[in-house]
Image: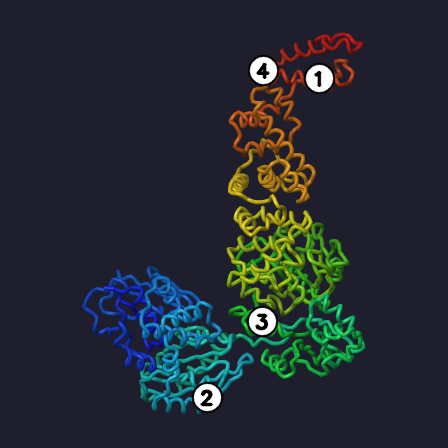
């Protein structure tokens, strides 16, 4: 027998999941739980005749071979179950870790379990009837708050739309989702409302209420919904004593409060916005004060909330520091240039330390259109509007709504100055989930210390402590932060100083030695450590470090900066900026996260641009629409990251790539080749090149450039091939790593020679590379003829050829005699030398000159061709050769000693 089960106190998602599973598995019997929510029971009272559900008592007395468990991961015991019963779970909650190993678990992060089943039903086309479609829609609507909860996904919305197309009734959905309270529920509602208390935890309003309802046998979730709507807290927690125990009902309206995490502490479950638990009472002795037991649970609940609730996001976490401001006396023409350069939509206008107005892009454009070059004071929106660094996002939202200002200055009363600016775009990122906080704690110090070697951590703390002395925040940014989350190794340290990196490097040299090399234009410095490694390891910060091998030879320090482009594809102009602006200049959101390193801030995550969210979703997303226009090399980078991480290019980013692809032709050969170099050293470079080919990126670099299958096969072969030591290739060849030379030659030599030469010139590959490429074509044409030539003739030809050219040809599908020639030459013939050399000829009295080459060549050729086989035969031949050339010299014939 095959059955379908769900959890007790079933809501519409549970009931709809029973139905959806039955529609997919027609032989499986959907069993109603003993307890149903009141609105669910009311629906069944009217429509159960049209539905397939049965009570557990009506099951036939047969063994249960298969159980489909829906919308829960907790299995109740049922008659007929045994050790061989197969359990298959489908759920939308986080997977539990304590289920039996032989269970088959399918979970996915959507708003409702019903959505997962509807997706399968849509594929198989098995939904029929208004009642079935309506019940499925009720399941989705109830668990997604009518598609308004933050946990709602686009999949839930598509599933709901499909059900409406199948005839689901929105009127019935509305009738049953919000039923009136029964008299008993109304009494409990009133008691809970009177007992409600609101606590401030981590800056959030948390409402908790306790009540005794042992006499009541109705569901409490409807009461929780109505109390939440009336009181409008950030989260609501009800503790109600019932006959079964103390029921915890939890509802949240804030991303900072994950009520599922709270419920799990009490062995309950649910999702981030709605959860529940049943807490067994510790004693049933009527002599004990049952209210005391209830209050003890309340105390435990508050302790859990202190650790689970995330701190409220404040203005200082999202603002841009060191804002660009204008003075009232500034001319509008100057403001226009700044807006064009940086793309800002507005500038605060400040007089002394006081905000006096806001100059908007719209006003400036209108003034320029009318050819007015007036003072900013005459054009600005006047007002003393600002927020404090510690203000909540709700306060910021209120200020923007009341004033209409899209750029609000942040004023620090302690420092008596502006310390930042926060924009409408920043607010939208937060409100739409584009900048969600990291789950659990935002401080990742422990994760970072486990990820990096102890030596690296000690060095980072040494640098950051010196930066703190200068008042500079220091950050670890870019790929290393991304790879920390992905659990990947290999990214380089990228340290950004929100201050003067050159000054910091100078201080480090003064304190510990070494030397620095700085670049004033870009505000960058390198601190070289190779001469002071042993000294560094004696410092207190390195007491746990035992080997200098883990210390880097140098540390790169970069001042936080912003940049702008004078025209598309140009190299950027760089100016000093805040960490927020520094991160915004980077290529993709997943590379915009930063970990602060100085002082008590060590390990704090900064994620202004939604990098963590896109990392979790596996998306490659640019930060702004002009990103590819400003730097088309990011097109190649997008493909590299997509394939390296198994991510997807976000839809809007993909559209922007199409528009910017032709600009690759305008990028210099060196910049393009740098990106191709990075592609070719990746383990999955064939897939990356294929993707570039399919997107038209290779053709945009050069019209003839592509990557057919035969090229990929040869490239893969060249990568996997173990090169025998006899080839004796240096690690660097033609100023390039030898492995890159091999890949480029394999790739390019498959073209016609003229095409390959043009591509080589386009990519600005070195002259030595081009010579080697031409040699491949020359030898390829002559190798058939050389098969019938003597070893000495072949050797004379190939002594002038770079061995790399022969190596590439040996990988090609040439005739077998050609492979034999190459192997004989490399492994044997090129090593053959005569027993005498120029010094020996000089001792014989032969003046230096062209004759040396002729004699030595004749001797080597004789050895190669087998004309001489012993040293004595070489000496005899040498005597003949010298006598042959006696007429060229006024010497006597040498005598044998």
- The earlier-in-sequence mark between 3 and 2 is 2
Q: Which mark is residue 429?
A: 3
Q: CA distance from mark 1 to mark 4?
A: 18 Å
Quadrant the C terminus occupies: top right
Q: Nearer the viewer, residue 36 or 53?
A: 53
**Residue where numbered disc 4 is placed:** 866
- The earlier-in-sequence mark between 2 and 1 is 2
Q: Residues within 10 Å of mark 4 (few under 14, many from 20)?
A: few
Question: Disc 1 vs disc 4: Cβ atoms closer than 8 Å?
Answer: no
Q: Can residue 836 be seen from the camera position used here?
A: yes
**Label 4 residue SS:** loop
Question: Disc 2 vs disc 1: Cβ atoms closer than 8 Å?
Answer: no
Q: Can residue 267 be seen from the camera position used here?
A: no
Q: CA distance from mark 3 to mark 2?
A: 34 Å
The x and y percentages for residue 780 are 59, 30
Q: Which mark is residue 672?
A: none
Q: Is residue 196 left or right of residue 329?
A: left
Quadrant the N terminus occupies: bottom left
The x and y percentages for residue 434 are 56, 69
Q: CA distance from mark 3 to mark 4?
A: 80 Å
**Residue drawn where x is 69% and y is 67% of the image:** 343
Q: CA distance from mark 1 to mark 3?
A: 80 Å
**Residue where numbered disc 2 is placed:** 196
**Residue where numbered disc 1 is placed:** 854
In the picture shown, does residue 746 fall above or below 226? above
Camera-side mark, 3 or 2: 3
């Amino acid at each position: 027998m095959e059955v379908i089960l769900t959890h007790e106190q079933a809501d519409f998602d549970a009931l709809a999941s029973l139905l959806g599973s039955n529609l997919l598995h027609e032989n499986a019997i959907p069993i109603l739980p003993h307890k149903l929510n009141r609105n669910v029971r009311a629906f069944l009272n009217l429509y159960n005749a049209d539905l397939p559900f049965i009570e557990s008592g009506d099951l036939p007395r047969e063994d249960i071979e298969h159980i489909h468990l829906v919308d829960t991961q907790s299995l109740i015991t049922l008659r007929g179950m045994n050790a061989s019963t197969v359990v298959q779970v489908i759920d939308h909650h986080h997977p539990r870790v304590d289920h039996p190993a032989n269970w088959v678990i399918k979970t996915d992060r959507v708003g409702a379990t019903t959505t997962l089943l509807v997706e399968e039903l849509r594929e198989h086309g098995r939904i029929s009837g208004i009642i079935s479609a309506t019940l499925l829609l009720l399941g989705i609507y109830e668990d997604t708050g009518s598609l308004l909860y933050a946990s709602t996904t686009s999949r839930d919305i598509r599933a709901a739309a499909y059900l409406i197309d199948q005839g689901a009734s929105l009127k019935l959905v509305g009738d049953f989702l919000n039923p009136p309270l029964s008299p008993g529920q109304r009494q409990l509602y009133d008691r809970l409302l009177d007992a409600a208390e609101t606590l401030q935890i981590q800056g959030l309003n948390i409402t908790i209420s306790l009540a005794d309802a042992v006499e009541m046998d109705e569901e409490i979730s409807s009461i929780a919904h109505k109390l939440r709507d009336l009181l409008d807290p950030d989260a609501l927690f009800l503790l109600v004593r019932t006959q079964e125990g103390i029921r915890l009902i939890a509802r949240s309206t804030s991303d900072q409060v994950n009520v599922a995490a709270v419920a799990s502490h009490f062995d309950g479950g649910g999702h981030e916005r709605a959860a529940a638990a049943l807490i067994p009472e510790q004693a049933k002795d009527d002599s004990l004060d049952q209210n005391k037991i209830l209050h003890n649970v309340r105390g435990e609940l508050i302790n859990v909330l202190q650790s689970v609730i995330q701190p409220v996001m404040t203005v200082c976490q999202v603002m841009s520091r060191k804002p660009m401001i204008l003075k009232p006396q500034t001319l509008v023409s100057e403001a226009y240039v700044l807006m064009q350069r940086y793309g800002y939509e507005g500038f605060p206008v400040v007089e002394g330390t006081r905000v006096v107005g806001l100059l908007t892009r719209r006003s400036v454009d209108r003034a320029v259109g009318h050819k007015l070059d007036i003072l900013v004071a005459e054009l600005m929106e006047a007002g003393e509007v600002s927020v404090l660094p510690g203000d909540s996002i709700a306060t910021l939202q209120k200020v923007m709504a009341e004033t209409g200002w899209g750029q609000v200055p942040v004023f620090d009363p302690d420092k008596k100055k502006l310390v930042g600016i926060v924009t409408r775009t920043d607010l939208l990122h937060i409100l739409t989930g584009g900048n969600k906080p990291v789950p659990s704690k935002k401080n990742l110090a422990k994760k970072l210390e486990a990820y990096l070697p102890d030596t690296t951590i000690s060095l980072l703390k040494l640098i950051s402590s010196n930066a703190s002395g200068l008042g500079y925040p220091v950050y670890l940014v870019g790929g290393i932060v991304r790879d920390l989350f992905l659990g990947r190794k290999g990214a380089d340290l990228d340290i950004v100083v929100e201050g003067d990196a050159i000054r910091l490097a100078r201080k480090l040299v003064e304190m510990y030695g070494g030397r620095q090399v700085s670049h004033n234009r870009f505000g960058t410095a390198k601190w070289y450590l190779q001469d002071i490694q042993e000294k560094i390891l004696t410092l207190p910060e390195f007491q746990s470090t035992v080997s200098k091998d883990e210390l880097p030879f140098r540390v790169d320090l970069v001042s936080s900066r912003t940049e702008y482009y004078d025209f598309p594809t140009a190299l950027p102009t760089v100016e000093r900026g805040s960490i927020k602006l520094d991160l915004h200049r980077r290529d993709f959101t997943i590379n915009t996260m930063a970990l602060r390193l100085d002082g008590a801030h060590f390990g704090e995550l900064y994620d202004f641009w939604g990098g963590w969210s896109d990392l979790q979703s596996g998306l490659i997303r640019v930060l702004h629409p002009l990103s590819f226009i400003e730097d088309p090399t990011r097109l190649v980078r997008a493909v590299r990251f997509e394939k390296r991480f198994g991510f997807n290019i976000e839809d809007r980013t993909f559209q922007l790539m199409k528009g910017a692809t032709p600009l690759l032709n305008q990028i210099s050969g060196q910049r393009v080749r740098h990106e191709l170099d990075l592609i070719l050293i990746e383990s999955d470079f064939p897939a990356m090149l294929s993707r570039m080919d399919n997107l038209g990126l290779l053709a945009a670099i050069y019209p003839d450039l592509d990557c057919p299958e035969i090229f990929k096969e040869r490239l893969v072969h060249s990568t996997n091939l173990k090169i025998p030591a006899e080839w004796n290739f240096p690690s660097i060849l033609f100023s390039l790593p030898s492995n890159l030379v091999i890949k480029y030659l394999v790739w390019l030599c498959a073209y016609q020679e003229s095409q390959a030469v043009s591509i080589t010139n386009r990519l600005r590959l070195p002259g030595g590379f081009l010579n080697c490429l031409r040699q491949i074509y020359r030898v390829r044409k002559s190798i058939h003829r050389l098969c019938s030539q003597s070893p000495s003739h072949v050797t004379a030809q190939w002594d002038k050829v770079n061995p790399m050219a022969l190596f590439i040809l040996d990988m090609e599908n040439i005739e077998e005699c050609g492979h034999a020639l190459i192997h004989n030459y490399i492994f044997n013939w090129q090593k053959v030398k005569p027993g005498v050399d120029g010094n020996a000829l000089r001792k014989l009295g032969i003046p230096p000159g062209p004759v040396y080459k002729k004699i030595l060549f004749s001797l080597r050729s004789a050895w190669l061709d087998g004309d001489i086989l012993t040293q004595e035969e070489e000496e005899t031949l040498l005597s003949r050769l010298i006598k042959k050339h006696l007429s060229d010299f006024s010497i006597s014939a040498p005598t044998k000693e």
